[in-house]
Image: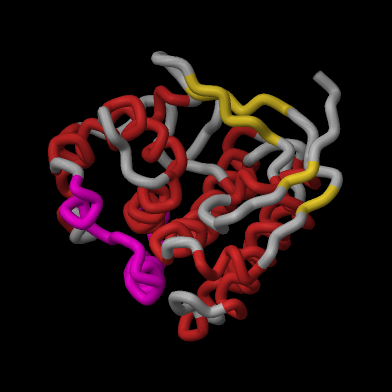
Amino acid sequence: QGVYFVSMPTTASHDGIVSPMASIKNPNTSISATAHSPIAVIADSEILAQSPFRLLAAGCADLIANFTAIKDWELAHRLKNESFSESAAALSIMSAHLITDNIANIKPNLEPSARIVMKSLFSGGMAISIAGSSRPASGSEHLFSHALDKILDKPALHGEQCGIGTIMMMYLHGGDWKAIRDALKAVQAPTTAKELNIAEEDIIEALMMAHEIRPERYTILGDNGISKEAAYELAYKTEVI
């Protein structure tokens, strides 16, 4: 509608707080529609610190997901000649490192912890604005989360699902998935299906259908996705199930 808005988050649970993209979901798919970035963000770090720590941990997990999102974006650039912004990618990775480099300082009910996470979410949102798409913060790990949203009657928090997706997708990329897992554990974010209260079968189904969620977005999952056997092996080797 071309209407400006001011974003006033009371919890730092995901990077949509400052994103210029709107995630529009229907029963069959999920799309990112271009919207307006907020003209200002008013985030009271004292209020953010008082919100349930689970929400702050989910925000950390959503930022850690940037690591695999950028790997997917680089892959699409190389294999599909998709446009790529080095500055947006660098800002996205910096936002993720703000979390992993300060992991010991992110604790419940601490204003400086909330400040770190909010600053990271803010810079992550700026990366999306620079790229003109959600690519810097949304890759195969987000497709996995969106697939879970479709499957489950009551999905877990967005960031929590993306965090677990990041563990598995980093494994597929041949990266240090254990470092991702350990970072999530350090901020008390879930790293297993059991901790998410999600059945193993739903994890496998989500892995198999993730590539169908946004077929125009090329990721490590490829155009055809992964088989049931490969999905089980992936979830088992990364200790998600």
* Number of on-image labels: 0
Q: Quadrant of the N terminus?
A: top right
Asked whether, in this view, residue 120 is left or right of residue 172, the answer is right
Residue depicted at 33% across the width and 71% down the height: 185
Image height of 98 relative to 171, above or below = below
Quarter of the view holding residue 135? top right
Residues drawn in magenta: 172-197
Residue 34 is situated, as x and y percent measured from the top left of the image, at 73, 28
Asked whether, in this view, residue 229 is left or right of residue 221, the answer is left
Image height of 167 relative to 223, above or below = below
Residue depicted at 73% across the width and 38% down the height: 20
Residue depicted at 70% across the width and 60% down the height: 43
Quarter of the view holding residue 134? top right
Residue depicted at 64% across the width and 64% down the height: 118
Asked whether, in this view, residue 226 is left or right of residue 232, the answer is right
Observer able to see residue 169:
no
Q: Nearer the viewer, residue 79 or 107?
A: 107
Q: Nearer the viewer, residue 172 or 208?
A: 208
Image height of 135 relative to 236, above or below = above
Q: Is residue 74 magenta?
A: no
Image height of 204 relative to 161, above or below = above
Residue 38 is situated, as x and y percent measured from the top left of the image, at 79, 43
Residue 153 is situated, as x and y percent measured from the top left of the image, at 26, 28
Q: Nearer the viewer, residue 14 or 69?
A: 14
**Colouring style:** secondary structure
Q: Nearer the viewer, residue 147 or 93?
A: 147
Residue 160 is situated, as x and y percent measured from the top left of the image, at 38, 52
Observer able to see residue 165:
yes
